[in-house]
Image (cartoon, rainbow, N blue to C red):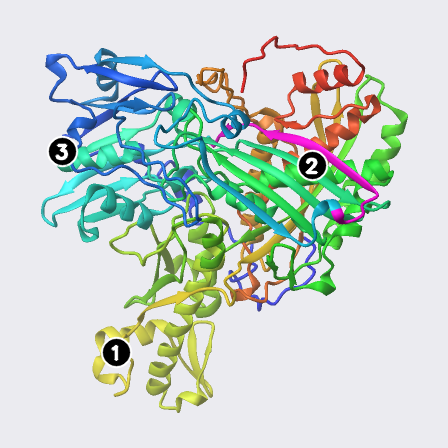
Amino acid sequence: MDVAASTSNLTPGGIGAKLERKEDDRFLRGRGQFIGDLRRPHMKEAMFVRSPLAHARIVSISIPDDLKDDVFTAADLKGVKPISARSLLSGFRSSAQTALATEKVRYVGEPVALCLASSRAEAEDMASRVDVQYEELAAIVDSLQARDCPEPRVHETWTDNIYLESVTEAGPPPESVGATISVRREFRTARQCMSPLEGKGALAYKDTRLDQLVFTTSTQMPHVVRTGLSEFLALDQERVRVIAPDVGGGFGYKGVLSPEELCVAWAALTLEVPIRWIEDRREHLTGNANCREQWYSITLHADARGRLLAIDAEAVVNAGAYGAYPFGASGEAGQIASLLPGPYDFQSYRCKTWSVATNKPPLLPYRGVARPGVCFALESMMDLVARAVGREPYEVRLDNLIRPDQMPFDNIVKKHIDSGDYPECLRRAVEAINLTSWRERQKKGEADGRHIGVGLCIFNEQGAHGMSVYAGWGVPVLPGYEQATVRLLPDGGLEVRVGIQSHGQGLETTLSQVAHEILGIHHSRIVVLHGDTSTSPYSVGTYASRSMVMAGGAVAAACRQLRDRAVKIGSHLLQVPQTDADFVAGEVRANAASISLREIAECWYKRPYDLPSDVDRGGLEVTAGYKTERDSGTFSYASHAVAVAVDPISGDVELLDYVVVEDGGVLVNPMIVDGQIIGGVAQGIGTALFEEMLFDSTGQPLGSTLADYLLPGATEMLDVRIFHMETPSPYSEFGMKGIGESGAIGPPAAILNAINDAISVYGAEVHSIPVTPRRIVEAIHAAQGGHRDIAGRQDLQ
């Protein structure tokens, strides 16, 4: 690991230690507790009757007489409010979704009826006997058609299909900058499915002793789910308890409240029996987990050497039929305009964005939200600018990147970029991939007829965002102070309670490292508790690379207050002035004497008569809040470099080498960071080469199993070589920056640039991801003056 700078005062197992994950012991032994492991007496399993059509009126629903006590429709859900996802932006159109469809369905897979039985198999049989008659309507599925044509309309009360249209402008008009070259292209990103190992699921029951709805769900944000259930079921929040057990991956999919969850909660309260729903993979793929579908038209204006003068862009996001709670339908489009300038310094910018409604499932947040598409589009354009001026792509980037002497830097859209050395990051990636060697091999050619290509990208990732940032994107759930509670136990152990939720990041380990750094308590005596709204402080949850910065800062703040209280008690017991006492490695020391935290805890809990008269009445339990010094977030950044071999006949792509140079500020646990990056790169490879949820012209999804929807596996991965820089953020505790999404952002851009570099010998370019063999072969044929449609399909959207 190459460390450029660090402010951490390392202690064994503290900040910077490669500590093995505490969580892995239970996971590797099969002792985790997921929704599928949980049962309650007399529990019923839920199955949903789902719409087979993308757009239709519900004419009738016929339920056999013997099923009428166990099948429910929207008419039964009296008092349940529609799920409404709002936006703070002016002009936004809201789209409320009822928990079960009423009058009309707007995408394939929309829930229409709820079936309950003693087993999932029985519930599925029941669902097959429910007869729903539909009057099919014309569907709209393409994002540009939805933007430009008011008919057919997804929502009849609207005048068109646009959730929100916005324009961001800064500097002089792009056409006035006096550019020597102007390069324009259009790009598309595919609709994907998140595909965590565990799908969504929920188990709900009524606690009659406390008169509470107890709702256990696989979620990233227990407190926000509680707020949503309270609002849509018209319950006071003290009557709702949300528990998140072990969560088998989230990636943003577990960051929403779904109609199915609302139905499960209603049924448990109404019938007063436990209800469980576990999503199967077909439900997940076809109707529940859609994400990322964007179109870009971008023009870059530059001088003769490729110095960037202006960006002029349009972007359309296919947001589907409804906005998902709590983030709504405008968050992705809202972010594009602010993210598109990336790590570059230029003076003219214009970006128009549209968030459009279609007869596809709601667009949900996925790891990197908007960033992979933005990086893909912008970094592809930077390569094209370099090609236009006859220079190496990395040289053009170096001329345009924000310099370290400019930090902190307010870019053209007023993003306050906190710290870093972007040019050095890129130079290290070029050196690590050994660009010169690949260029020599590229010139010689491959004996098997394949072509070598090398691709680069560089990007920054804003994490730990504050209120002003989310408000600017129109997101209605605004983060404030993150809180943590720490409690020193009578025998010297430590409980850390946080409102965020871990779903694979290793937070039980890294938050323990923060507590150990300050209090010196051994990791075996620290337990991190999360995922229960009845015992944890409020939090908006785990997303947007915020957890380690925000919750880590809160744990540090609480531990420092606890340490100060311990010093006060310890100095009294040592009979020295408090100013003469120091806290070192879990002990209060003065002169040659010391007293441990365990002894201090025993005094507080068992011998209160030995305490000083002015002891803090809060005792050895502290709740503290934290936010970064600035509301604008932290900025990690990375450069990805990849070498590929492309077969021009079959379109096959082989990844030959992959390098990541990243700077996530001070790293709490570099081993866990490496795991995050490798996992993200795997997802990014899927985005770049494999994953595509296709729909036909009537809105039918064409992938319903993992045989249809391709995910990368072990044979598609390669050894990712990771190099760290470590530039502290001046605004966060310990100098930490968010790092959770970084690995997934860069691969689509780097891999597409490498492929286009390889096929540039034919004058060919690909502008859509995933870069499938078909698209590569068709691009080559088109560049040679011919065209061959391998698949023979023209109706895919």
Q: Name the spot of residue 208 as percent of width and height, x first.
A: 10, 44
Crowdedness near tag 1: few (<14), some (14–19) or many (≥20) residues, C-alpha within 10 Å: few
Quadrant location, the C terminus: top right
Q: Which residue is mark 2?
A: 750
Is 428 situated left or right of 576 in this image? right
Q: Which of the 4 quarters of the picture holds residue 777?
A: top right
Q: 475 above or below 443?
A: below
Q: Which residues are magenta?
A: 176-194
Q: Name the spot of residue 750 as percent of width and height, x first.
A: 69, 36
Q: Name the spot of residue 453 as percent of width and height, x first.
A: 78, 30
Q: Are marks 3 and 2 in contact (CB under 8 Å)?
A: no
Q: Amino acid under label 2?
A: Ala
Q: Are marks 2 and 1 in contact (CB under 8 Å)?
A: no
Viewer-side label of 2, 1: 2
**Label 1 vs label 3: CA separation?**
43 Å
Q: Which residue is mark 3?
A: 273
Instruction: Tell me the element at label 2.
Output: helix
Is 474 situated left or right of 427 in this image? left
**Label 2 vs label 1: CA separation?**
57 Å
| Residue 747 in view (yes/no) | yes
Q: Which residue is mark 1?
A: 617
Viewer-side label of 3, 2: 2
